[in-house]
Image: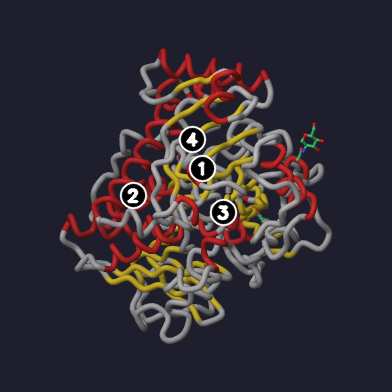
């Protein structure tokens, strides 16, 4: 859920848990995956998640239960592309599929399958930041993946931020999705954090990355401008209402003329089996995969796993690579008006905490303006040694994390009247992020499963990456459907790809 998540650390806590009561997957399936077992933490999304500000406000989620009853798919017809997951990745994939297919003048059938309500995974439960990373981690990426791929890791985020902002503007929906060009400040609580950031900044600059608008501020400048006694770095960024963006992307895909799209919420995919497997006979034999749900099954020629943290439920081969990690958010009422709080989004403490004030309660008279809600996430570092890893249960909140979050802002701005000590949050919720061992997403065709693709593992930094990961996978599928060779976009880091050899 974070903006930068733990993008810059990780990989120290990745234990592989073994279990005695694990359940063997599809023991009859005639392919290699049958040899994986499912550890107890690896589940479908729970059915009673905590209520999130973004998706549970009355009236904000018109697609919440779309397609949850009635005929699955298009009757007996095979589906060209089944997308599993209706968060920003899945719906971006639909958006790009439609756009690319339209450009070729062909129409195909696309079905989206969502386990819970529309957009109820991490996209509907995150921090709401569209904060691209400008330079953090440049040095380490350069040493691991080479200079070109390191540079592309920033270009892809620039591509996403620019594309999303342009889509919102071109539909005239800036207010509808609460897009705020608020910029971002990362605070450095520790000297080491500031030192590494400056080093990465200089490396990125030396390699020609565009760092326009990035400004390092020392303690004096931070105190003067923002009343905070830590150094930091300021850079351009946006915040928005993620569900509303995803709804816009879905609606705008539907309004395209040619291809047929169907969305089925409350329809968890429980397994994906080869259509030729014994016991599965279908009128149209060319379909490759059978996707099973409690409502029946669908035949799909291509599948996109847009399930982020949950990906390994259906793809157990990723269980050591994508670690479900619970993030927690709080909606806290500030004590001062937005005029004093300012519109910026913030991050601090190695990316553990992240927040911004909602652009709400706007009124013409300064006196009657209510203090805004501030949406604050983080606190995993105080949750205990596992830091909320290896759980898919977002039906609960952690009391320890609650305490950390409730204290955080009054403590940071102690001595001011921006926040009130001891004020209870108006909402608290959790969501499950998919952390990879190197912090980078996993994108592309799944080895040995012809026709299945993955775009997952966004490591709490999905808003500025998922849209493009979906674009890459949609491009691969459209190339296949049109018998063309797929050409990687110039912004796609090779090390995101499933073909990357570590
Ligand atoms: C799966 O396990 C079976 C039985 O233990 C073994 O014969 C088979 O070779 C294994 N398949 C793979 C791909 O590892
Ligand atoms: C603010 O500072 C005062 C004085 O140092 C301290 O007593 C108080 O606990 C602090 N409040 C918070 C919320 O940290």
Q: Residue 241, percent across and down? A: 45, 56
- Tell me the crowding category of disc 1: few under 14, some 14 to 19, or many 20 or more residues within 10 angstroms, Cα based: many
- Tell me the crowding category of disc 3: few under 14, some 14 to 19, or many 20 or more residues within 10 angstroms, Cα based: many
- Marks 3 and 1, how far apart at CA: 31 Å
Going from the N terminus, do you reach mark 3 or mark 2 first? 3
Q: What SS does tag 1 mark?
A: loop
- Marks 1 and 2, how far apart at CA: 16 Å
Q: Quadrant of the C terminus?
A: top right
Q: Residue 351, percent across and down? A: 61, 36
| Front label number (2 vs 4) | 4
Q: Residue at x 48, y 68 (%)?
A: 118
Q: Which residue is mark 4?
A: 184
Q: Which residue is mark 3?
A: 373
Q: Which residue is mark 1?
A: 441
Q: Residue 261, percent across and down? A: 32, 70
Q: In the rendered image, which quarter is residue 310 located in?
A: bottom right
Q: Which residue is mark 2?
A: 476
């Amino acid at each position: 859920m974070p903006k930068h998540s733990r993008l810059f650390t990780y990989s120290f806590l990745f234990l592989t848990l073994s279990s005695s009561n694990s359940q063997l997957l599809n023991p009859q399936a005639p392919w290699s995956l049958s040899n994986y077992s499912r550890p107890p933490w690896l589940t479908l999304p729970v059915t009673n998640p905590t209520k999130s500000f973004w998706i549970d406000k009355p009236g904000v989620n018109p697609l919440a239960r779309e397609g949850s009853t009635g005929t699955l798919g298009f009757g007996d017809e095979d589906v060209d592309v089944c997308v599993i997951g209706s968060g920003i990745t899945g719906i971006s994939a639909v958006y790009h599929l439609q756009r690319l297919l339209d450009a070729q003048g062909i129409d195909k059938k696309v079905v989206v399958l969502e386990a819970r309500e529309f957009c109820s995974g991490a996209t509907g439960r995150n921090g709401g930041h569209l904060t691209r990373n400008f330079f953090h981690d440049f040095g380490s990426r350069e040493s691991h993946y080479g200079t070109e791929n390191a540079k592309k890791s920033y270009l892809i985020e620039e591509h996403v931020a620019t594309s999303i902002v342009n889509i919102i503007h071109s539909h005239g929906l800036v207010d509808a999705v609460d897009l705020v060009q608020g910029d971002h400040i990362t605070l450095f609580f520790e000297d080491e954090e500031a030192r590494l950031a400056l080093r990465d900044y200089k490396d990125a600059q030396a390699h020609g990355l565009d760092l326009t608008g990035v400004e390092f501020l020392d303690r004096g400048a931070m105190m003067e401008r923002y009343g905070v006694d830590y150094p930091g770095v300021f850079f351009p960024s946006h915040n928005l209402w993620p569900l509303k963006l995803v709804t816009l992307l879905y609606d705008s895909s539907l309004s395209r003329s040619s291809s047929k799209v169907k969305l089925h919420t409350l329809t968890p995919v429980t397994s994906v089996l080869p259509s030729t497997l014994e016991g599965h006979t279908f009128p149209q034999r060319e379909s490759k995969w059978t996707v099973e749900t409690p409502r029946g099954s669908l035949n799909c020629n291509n599948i996109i796993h847009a399930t982020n943290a949950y990906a390994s439920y259906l793809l157990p081969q990723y269980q050591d690579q994508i670690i479900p990690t619970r993030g927690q958010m709080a909606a806290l009422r500030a004590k001062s008006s937005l005029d004093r709080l300012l519109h910026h989004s913030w991050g601090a403490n190695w990316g553990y905490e992240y927040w911004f004030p909602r652009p709400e309660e706007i009124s013409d008279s300064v006196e009657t303006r209510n203090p805004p809600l501030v949406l604050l996430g983080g606190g995993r570092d105080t949750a205990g040694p596992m830091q909320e890893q290896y759980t898919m249960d977002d039906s609960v909140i952690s009391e320890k994390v609650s305490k950390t979050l409730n204290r955080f802002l009054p403590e940071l701005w102690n001595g001011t009247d921006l926040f009130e000590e001891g004020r209870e949050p108006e909402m608290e919720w959790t969501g499950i992020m998919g952390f990879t061992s190197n912090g980078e997403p996993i994108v592309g065709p799944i080895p040995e499963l012809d026709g299945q693709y993955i775009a997952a593992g966004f490591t709490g930094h999905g808003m500025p990456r998922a849209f493009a990961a979906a674009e890459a996978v949609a491009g691969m599928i459209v190339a296949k459907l049109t018998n063309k060779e797929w050409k990687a976009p110039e912004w796609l880091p090779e090390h995101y790809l499933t073909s990357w050899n570590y």
